[in-house]
Image: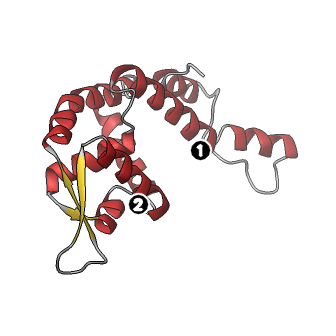
Amino acid sequence: MRFTVKYVYVLINRGVLSMSRPKPGKSTHAEALEAALDGLGPLARQLNQLHTRLWYEQVHQDLTGPQFTVLSLLELHGDMDQGTLGAAAHLDKSTAAPLLERLRGRGLLEIEKDERDRRRKLVRITDGGRRLVARLAPGVIDVSDQLLEGLSTGEREEFLRLLRRVTAR
């Protein structure tokens, strides 16, 4: 799909796409299906596809968004244990461990056992990881700006506020 956020926003404003649900008791099977197809799931998937394409084209072809998030959190907050880092990056355990190993394998972070608690693994960003996130951060911001270019400043703030509220579960 090559829909831009601006195009989707225009379709919603013109009433072609709707985020509203059919009224209970008055919907037909077809109306329910149309509402499902016009709902959050398909729109979220389209937004994710667009973000992924722009990221690949403009930010980095070998570093994913979650990997950038992990490195950025380490750069901003310093060393963390693996569980705290995974939670801060909104990664489940089955995703966090292999992601960290890939970054370690590329020399972007170090993982070592905590001397006080050998069950814990401490994660530290390397100088190479620091240089990479510093270099990529402007591109990450540009991708976000492109995705939201059809919105006014106030609409952008409201859209992001609502997304944060929805995802805060």
Locate residue 109, reporting x and y percent.
23, 49
Q: Which residue is rendered at x = 23% and y = 80% of the image?
A: 117
Locate residue 84, reporting x and y percent.
29, 67
Locate residue 157, reporting x and y percent.
30, 40
Q: Categorize mark 1 by other alpha carbons within 10 Å: few (<14), some (14-19), many (20+).
A: some
Going from N to C along the chain, the mark reached first, 1 or 2, is 1
Q: Quadrant of the N terminus?
A: top right
Please give the label number shown on residue 40: 1
Locate residue 2, reporting x and y percent.
56, 19
Q: Secondary structure at mark 2?
A: loop
Comparing 117 with 136, the one in front is 117
Q: Which residue is rendered at x = 17% and y = 76% of the image?
A: 115
Please give the label number shown on residue 168: 2
Q: Categorize mark 2 by other alpha carbons within 10 Å: few (<14), some (14-19), many (20+).
A: few
Comparing 121 with 61, the one in front is 121
| Total marks placed | 2
Please give the label number shown on residue 2: none
Question: What is the residue that sits farthest to the bottom in this orientation?
Answer: 116
Q: Which residue is rendered at x = 21% and y = 63% of the image?
A: 80
> What distance separates the C-alpha of mark 1 from that of mark 2?
16 Å
Under mark 1, the amino acid is Leu
Q: Quadrant of the C terminus?
A: bottom left
Under mark 2, the amino acid is Ala
Q: Which residue is rendered at x = 31% and y = 77% of the image?
A: 119
Q: How is the image coloured?
A: secondary structure
**Residue 97 vs residue 7: left or right?**
left
Q: Secondary structure at mark 1?
A: helix
Quadrant of the rendered structure where residue 87 is?
A: bottom left
- Whether 60 is drawn above or below 130: the answer is above
